[in-house]
Amino acid sequence: MRTRTKLAGALSAGALAVLGMAGPTSASTTLESTIAAQAERAGLDRSEVAGLQKQIDQQMAFTPGGKQIGVNQVAWRDGKTIMTFPLPGEKQARAVDEAVGTLGTANCSYTWTCLYEHANYDGRRLTWQDCAFNDLSDWGFHDKTSSWHNNQTSGTVTKVYNWTGSYWSQIWSSSAPARDSYVGSSDNDKADGIRVC
């Protein structure tokens, strides 16, 4: 049987390594406690937590400036861009405290736009809340989108682009609320940029 104390101890070195700190600080112990608590609520064992941590470490190395905010989430831009990884045994990405939805159901929070790695809203979820153009290659998410959910305030537009090699070509746009469980074979894995609102 897993215990919170054992899991927190196991996570201590990993959380400190992520933060690049030699000893505990208030920030590191807060993250450590958050990860331990989320892992316990999700019923994750040490190897599952370690697997998620490896994915997060790789993502943070690829996209500097991120901050781990949970056992399976990284945030950038003061929390206005978030990448969520699926929990072990699940296809769809969700934060630990998000309800488990019906398979094939979009789960983008209100006022956000979400891109999903696979059809039916499965795989990693990359979300935005601020009005800006984003080059998906900055997150290693270019040519990876198969489904999306625009859940911004009503009428707010999201535009998605493909980089042709010389210019940004719009491949779809949506006015909130809108979603698509599969972008279609002609647009699948072609998104390279997104302009939210």
Image (tube, rainbow, N blue to C red):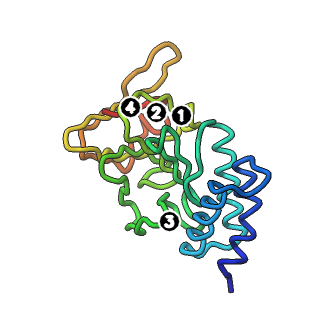
Residue shown at 69% from the left, 45% from the top: 58
The Cα atoms of the two marked residues, 4 and 3, are separated by: 28 Å
**What quarter of the picture does the C terminus occupy?**
top left
The amino acid type of the residue labelled 1 equals: His
Q: Nearer the viewer, mark 3 or mark 1?
A: 3
Q: Position of residue 139 (x, y in %)?
A: 57, 37
User: In the displayed structure, would residue 30 be above or below residue 118?
Assistant: below
The Cα atoms of the two marked residues, 4 and 1, are separated by: 11 Å
Residue density around tag 1, few if under 14, some if 14–19, many if 20 or more, within 10 Å: some
User: In the displayed structure, would residue 99 be above or below residue 67?
Assistant: below
The Cα atoms of the two marked residues, 3 and 2, are separated by: 27 Å
Q: Position of residue 116 (x, y in %)?
A: 46, 48
The amino acid type of the residue labelled 4 equals: Val
Who comes first in sequence, dot 3 or dot 1? Answer: 3
Instruction: Name the mark on residue 112.
Output: none
User: In the displayed structure, would residue 156 be above or below residue 9?
Assistant: above
Residue shown at 49% from the left, 46% from the top: 82
The Cα atoms of the two marked residues, 2 and 4, are separated by: 6 Å
Instruction: Name the mark on residue 160.
Output: 4
Q: Are marks 4 and 1 in contact (CB under 8 Å)?
A: no
Instruction: Name the mark on residue 96.
Output: 3
Depth order, front residue of 120/59: 59
The Cα atoms of the two marked residues, 2 and 1, are separated by: 6 Å
Q: Are marks 2 and 4 in contact (CB under 8 Å)?
A: yes
Q: Secondary structure at mark 4?
A: strand
Q: Are marks 3 and 2 in contact (CB under 8 Å)?
A: no
Q: Which residue is mark 1?
A: 142
Hey, which residue is sitting farthest front in the picture?
Answer: 26
Instruction: Name the mark on residue 191.
Output: 2
